[in-house]
Structure formats: C-alpha cells, structure tokens
C-alpha cells in the first residue's frame, strides 16, 4: 500500500494487495463521490436506501433465467457481426478493425438485452464514437478532475454549460460533444421506451409483464406501477451508464480475447473443437454453453490478466483500522500490523496488480494460461478470498 497526493494535496492510498482488496470491498468503504461526476445528484444512488432500492428493481434483469432468455439476442448479433466481417474481408485483402466491430456488436447487445432498443449494428453511430472516446478524453482531464466538485457548484447548469462552450480547448469541446451525444441518445431511447410503456397503461400489471420485455429499461419503467418511482432524468442517467459501462468493457474484453486466441493457436484449436462438438452446427444452448470448461477457462484467464476495469476507487465512510497482510517495521523500529485510515480517505484499488500478484497466482502470474482454471487452483488463490462476480476474480 502506498500513499499518493493528487491535485490540491488530497491524500490517496494506493492498494495492490488482495488482502486489502477483500477488506475494502467487503467491509469498510463506499464508492467515492468522484465516481458520480455524470448522472444524478451526487451521493443519491451510490449508497444507502436509494441504492438498495435501485438494486432491488434492477437485479432481476441480471438473473440467470433472464440472461438465458437473452441468449438468442446475443447469437443473432454475433451472427450479424460475423457476416459483416466476412463480407468486408471478401471485398479485398485488408486489415479489419476488430475492436470497432465488437464495439458495434456490444452496443447492439446492450441495446437489445439491456434497454429493449435496437441500434443498427452494421452502421456507424455517433454514440459509438462517443463511447469509445470517453475514457481517453477523461484521462486527459486527470489534473482538472478534482476541480469538478467545485465547478459543479458554480452558478446554474445553464451558466456552466455556456461557460464551457466559451473555453478555447479542443479537449473540452470534444468532451462536451461526447456528453451531449450520450445524453441525446439516452433521452431518445427513454422517450421511445416510455411511450411504449404508456401505450400499455390500460392493461393490468400482470398483463403488462407478459407483454413487456425483462430488460433493465422495462423493469425500471414497470417500477412506476408499484410505487418505486424514479425520476425521468434518473432513468436517462441509468441508460447512459449502461451504454458506457456495458459497451466499453464488453468490447475491450472480447477484442482482447480474440487477440490472445490468435497469438495462441493451440488453445484456439482446442476451443474451436470444444465449441464445434457442443454445437453440432447449431447455436449452443445456454445450459451447455456455460458448462464448457475450456471456454470458461479462457474467459476467466482473460479477465484475470486483462480486467476491463483495472482500477476501482473507494472512500472511507468513517475512521477505520485496516489490518496488513504482513507486518512491517516502521522507521522507529516498531512492528506495524495495521494502519489508521481517516474518514474521507480515497483508496485506489489496483485490481490489475491483485490479479497479477505472483505471491497469489504463482510465478506464471504474468502469463496467459487458461489451463490454470482446469484443475484445482493453488491454495494461495483460494485463501486470498478475492471478492468478485466470478469466483477468485
């Protein structure tokens, strides 16, 4: 664990240990308000009752039965992407930007499966470029990002927007375009979906549940009927969040997986044989797909070595003593077994470092080795109790 100082001398802890990872995610810390620059009023949805209410509404959309229902959507989009790439390659020998194509596919999957809305996966869309440019542009504002909290209190929203438009900075203007594109797209999707929801308003809630989809947007709109009202702007913010978080992470993970398979022809051949045997020329049913051992191992190992979200940020809600995995000797010669973390301290958790820790994963921690998941994991991995959606990740 290291101490850092950001702009304005803000004290930040950098954590790279799985020991700290487990305790930060599992016990002491909440998401930082800095995670909430776009979206609803700061702090309104990160923690507490409001956050719990939203999770209650949206969790069914990510349940196993619901994901199973979405499988045909994923196959359909994948077939469209495959056919489009085959046509493009057939036109002439040329390089194909796989990241852009999987980005389009991910956008369509999120649109149909998450929002009940279809983009045209074979055409470039302004929102696609906006989603891809967002993270690189944010990185260009690292020095100024701590100022956002203070700038957000300056005058009215219209005044701040007018002021932003006057700044002679290409980066600022591009960021403004990105924000506008994401908002306009999210508002357009919301208007279409809410209109469809109102068209069903004469039906009973039971009948509407049969008619409407089980995507996140439909579940949020249905929540109005049972008293769990969410404001229009809040719903639009959820759409923006899903478009960015789902599209960017999914496309990056898919592109990286394809790259690694291209670099490891032997594993690619084994995986192809496993898929061909399981599918027999047809789309593989969900139950059989999730039971394919090598496919699961390839996904896990790619996410371990190249996590789509390599860093997470948390903030201590109160003063806590954080135990160390290994005692250290202080400058005064005293043994230190825990450190005091004041309230309001920002912690940066390096998920990438934890996933590549040789003390946990072994000497081959920096190598892409899917076979590690096909047998019992080392005891060091099991004992690390790494929190996550995927076990041990």
Image (cartoon, rainbow, N blue to C red):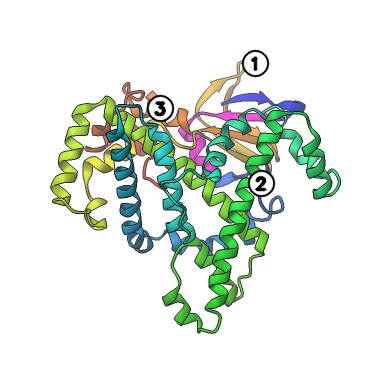
Q: Nearer the viewer, residue 90 or 194?
A: 90
Left-right relation of 9 to 4: right
The span from disc 2 to disc 1 (Cα, nearest Å) is: 55 Å
Q: Which residue is mark 2?
A: 180
Left-right relation of 299 to 59: left
Q: Is residue 157 above or below residue 195?
A: above
What SS does tag 2 mark? Answer: helix
Label 2 CA crowd tier, 10 Å (few <14, some 14–19, many 20+):
some
- Rendered image quadrant of residue 136: top right
- What quarter of the picture does the N terminus occupy? top right
| Image: magenta residue range | 11-26
Q: Nearer the viewer, residue 346 or 352?
A: 352
- Residue 332 is labelled as 1
Q: Which residue is mark 3?
A: 356
Q: Nearer the viewer, residue 220 or 44?
A: 220
Contact, mark 1 vs mark 3 (Cβ under 8 Å): no
Q: Earlier in the sequence, mark 1 or mark 3?
A: 1
Q: Is residue 368 above or below residue 287?
A: above
Residue found 35% across the figure and 32% down from its top:
380
Q: Earlier in the sequence, mark 2 or mark 1?
A: 2
Left-right relation of 1 to 304: right
């Amino acid at each position: 664990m290291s101490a850092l100082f950001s702009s304005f001398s803000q004290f930040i802890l950098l954590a790279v240990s799985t020991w700290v990872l487990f305790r930060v995610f599992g016990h002491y810390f909440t998401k930082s308000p800095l995670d909430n620059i776009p979206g609803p009023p700061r702090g309104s949805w990160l923690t507490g009752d409001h956050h719990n209410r939203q999770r209650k509404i949206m969790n069914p959309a990510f349940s196993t039965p619901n994901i199973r229902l979405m499988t045909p959507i994923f196959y359909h989009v994948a077939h469209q992407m495959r056919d489009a790439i085959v046509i493009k390659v057939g036109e002439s020998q040329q390089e194909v930007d796989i990241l852009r194509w999987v980005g389009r596919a991910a956008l369509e999957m999120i649109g149909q499966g998450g929002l009940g809305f279809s983009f045209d996966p074979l055409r470039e869309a302004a929102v696609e470029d906006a989603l891809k440019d967002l993270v690189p542009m944010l990185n260009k504002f690292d020095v100024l990002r701590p100022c956002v909290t203070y700038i957000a209190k300056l005058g009215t929203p219209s005044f701040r927007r007018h002021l932003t438009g006057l700044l002679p900075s290409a980066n600022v203007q591009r960021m403004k375009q990105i924000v506008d594109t994401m908002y306009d797209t999210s508002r357009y999707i919301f208007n279409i979906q809410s209109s469809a929801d109102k068209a069903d308003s004469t039906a009973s809630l039971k009948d509407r549940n049969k008619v409407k989809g089980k995507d996140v947007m439909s579940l949020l709109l249905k929540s109005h009927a049972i008293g769990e009202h969410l404001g229009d702007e809040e719903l639009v913010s959820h759409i923006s969040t899903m478009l960015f978080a789902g599209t960017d992470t999914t496309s990056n993970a898919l592109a990286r997986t394809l790259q690694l398979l291209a670099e490891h022809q032997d594993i690619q051949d084994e995986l192809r044989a496993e898929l061909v045997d399981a599918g027999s020329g047809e789309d593989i049913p969900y139950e059989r797909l999730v039971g394919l051992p090598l496919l699961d191992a390839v996904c896990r190992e790619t996410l371990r070595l190249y996590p789509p979200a390599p860093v997470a940020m948390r903030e201590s809600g109160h003063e806590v003593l954080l135990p160390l995995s290994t005692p250290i000797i202080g400058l005064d010669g005293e043994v230190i077994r825990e450190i005091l973390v004041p309230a309001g301290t920002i912690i940066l958790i390096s998920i990438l470092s934890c996933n590549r820790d040789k003390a946990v994963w072994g000497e081959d921690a920096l190598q892409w080795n899917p076979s590690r998941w096909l047998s019992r994991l080392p005891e060091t991995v099991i004992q690390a109790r790494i929190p996550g959606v995927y076990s041990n990740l």
